[in-house]
Image: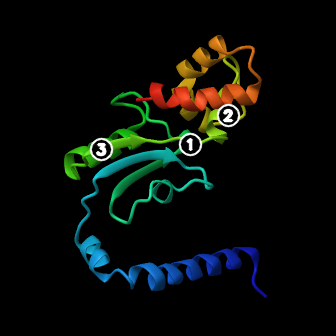
């Protein structure tokens, strides 16, 4: 009898085998080229939400996008001493890979945006890492709350999902 964890491993192995059979083996030229090097045209920032896959959503093939996923798909303003994973990803994409286009995409019903809007402005919150990360969007949160205070919470989240894309980079 398989345990739940073993079922997960079997599911992932099966998915990989299906990918190899249905995608990799049917595109030998593409994957031979990708084995040697990558030269993506796009850098895509997207939310890490499991319901959204940026390459599928944008219709991109393997090798076309250098993708960075994080909570709420945020791109913090430059600070040499903070958020180095995002900064190093941008530097690598631009300097080493020479991407032509950087795209930041978001989605509706974003859990990261909901958490940002739910954070107390002062005092302790329930998280260790999430709070520090989503606070990147604090300025956008305050603007949305100030300008849309009469809207219900869910509608404020929708507004913040859109505003956040404009404020984080």
Which quarter of the figure has residue 140?
top right
The residue closer to the viewer here, 75 or 4, is: 75
Q: How many marks?
A: 3
Question: Residue 147 location, x and y as percent?
Answer: 63, 12
Using residue 52 as the reference point, say whether residue 109 is left or right of it: right
Q: Which residue is mark 1?
A: 71
Q: Nearer the viewer, mark 1 or mark 3?
A: 3
Q: Which residue, as the protein is rendered here, is positioned at the far front?
A: 59
Query: Image quadrant for the C terminus?
Result: top left
**Rendered view: 132 above or below 62:** above
Mark 2 and mark 1 in contact (Cβ < 8 Å)?
Answer: yes
Rounded to the nearest angstrom, the CA distance separating label 1 from label 2 is 10 Å
Q: Which comes before the other along the chain, label 1 or label 2?
A: 1
Q: Which mark is residue 2?
A: none
Q: Nearer the viewer, mark 2 or mark 3?
A: 3
Q: Which residue is mark 2?
A: 115
Question: Residue 78 location, x and y as percent?
Answer: 35, 28
């Amino acid at each position: 009898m398989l345990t739940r964890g073993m079922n997960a491993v079997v599911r992932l192995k099966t998915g990989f085998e299906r990918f190899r059979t249905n995608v990799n083996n049917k595109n030998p030229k593409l994957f031979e080229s990708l084995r040697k090097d990558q030269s993506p045209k796009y850098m895509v920032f997207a939310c890490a939400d499991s319901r959204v896959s940026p390459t599928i959503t944008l219709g991109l093939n393997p090798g076309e996008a250098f993708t960075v996923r994080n909570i709420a798909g945020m791109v913090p303003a430059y600070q040499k001493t903070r958020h180095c994973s995002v900064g190093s990803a941008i530097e690598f994409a631009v300097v080493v890979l020479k991407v032509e286009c950087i795209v930041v995409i978001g989605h509706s019903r974003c859990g990261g945006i909901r958490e940002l809007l739910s954070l107390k402005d002062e005092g302790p919150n329930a998280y260790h890492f999430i709070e520090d990360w989503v606070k990147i969007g604090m300025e956008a949160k305050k603007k949305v709350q100030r300008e849309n205070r009469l809207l219900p919470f869910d509608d404020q989240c929708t507004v913040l999902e859109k505003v956040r894309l404009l404020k984080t980079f």
